[in-house]
Image (tube, rainbow, N blue to C red):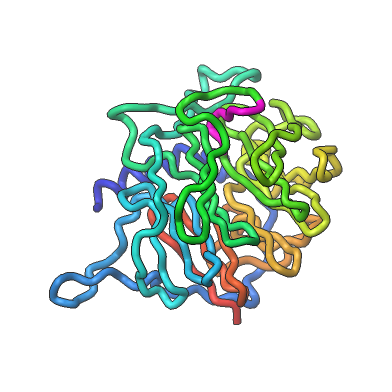
Amino acid sequence: MRVSRFFAALMVASLFPLLANAQPADPPAKRYKAVAEWPKPPRGDKGFAAGPWNYWQVPGVAVARNGNILVLHRGEYPILEYRPNGDFVGPWGDVTFDQGKVMFVPKENRTPAISGYQAVYGPPGCSNCGAHEIRVDRHGNVWVVDAPAHVIYKMNPQGRTVMTLGTKGKAGNTQNSFYMPTDIAFAPNGELVVADGYGNARIMRFTADGKFLGQFGSRGNGPGQFQLPHNLVIDKNGLIYVSDRENRRVEIFDAQGKYLREWKNVGSLSSLAMTRDQQIWAGGVLRSLDGKAIESLPGEGANARAHGAAIAENGDVYLGLLDGTVKKFVRQ
């Protein structure tokens, strides 16, 4: 376990080189309290606690239709289900993930025209390292992103795969292929919106049944461009909010992809989650839709290393971190 945590820490360090940059002060924590230990530790055959959970890395977390929490991690049984109180329910879903691993392109080998990321396959990879994000749509379907396999899977509420977006094992820049996608969001009209972010630098739109509608974005630092479109959420009016992680901003587009505005200098965000009252948890900071910082989670902020987040019906917040932990914050 110590060895796996050591390598997890190395990957965290490699994936977040910009976190040390100057950052506006985070707002204070107001309404949230951190849960000391979540989930409850596993127990050995004598009935004693034997924790912590050996997740290795936790790139995502989601709230299922039944209110239970789905933890996405990069080890065996990659999706684990827990009750909100931390009790373990069991493994969930029928998906296994690629063994490829997303890694940096060395800085000296980068050019403005190519992504700063690559996938490594074979022995340098790891079990289920392809697990990148998990989201639940309004119908209770669970969607998971397998970045190095270049696909996104849709599972029904019972955990059976019913749709695949992309072409498994084939990177591309076409209407039917991704190059290491990063996230998926669901528009009010039922459209699917995908961040095709590590290899390409675009946002793609699909019908609810997976038919291509259009795309927008290109590589760069200007308005409507991306260096790494890592996460996205959609508000009730259909506006699309995209974390452009390496440009330390969130860009906002209309439903068809027209650039509208951006939040500047909000951190190298790897996590966006929309609340029921139309605010966004951006890393560890809650922001209004115009980007104004409202409050922080205790011990977290814009530079929080959350890689995934989920909000329960009662407002509790769950963060998945690449250090191999899940954090829960209870709304007071």
- Relative depth, front residue between 96 and 9: 96
Point 43% across, 77% down: residue: 85
- Give the residue drawn at x 37%, y 74%: 87
Query: In the depicted view, which residue is nearer to us: 279 or 283?
Result: 279
Find the residue positioned furthest to the left: 46
- Residue 205 in the image, given as x and y percentages of width and height: 72, 38
Residue 22 in percent (x, y) is at 64, 46
Q: Residue furthest bottom?
A: 332
Name which residue lies at 44% across and 54% down.
Answer: 72
Q: Is residue 218 magenta?
A: no
Q: Quadrant of the C terminus?
A: bottom right
Question: Which quarter of the figure has residue 228?
Answer: top right
Rendered position, 144 above or below 330 = above
Image location of residue 71, percent across then percent down:
44, 59
99 sits to left or right of 182: left
Residue 179 is inside the magenta segment: yes
Left or right position of 9 against 183: left
Q: Residue at x 86, y 43 (%)?
A: 260
When the figure is inspected, residue 227 is found, relative to residue 129, above or below; the finding is above
* Relative height, residue 252 to residue 297 (above, below): above
- Work out whether residue 305 can be spotted: no
Is the residue 154 above or below the residue 25 in the image? Answer: above
- In the image: residue 247, left or right of residue 57: right
Which secondary structure class fits the magenta region best? loop
Occupied quadrant, residue 203: top right
**Total tally of numbered discs in the picture:** 0
Residue 316 horizontal/vertical position (percent): 57, 73
What are the residue bounds of the magenta stretch? 175-181
* Res. 52 visible in picture: yes
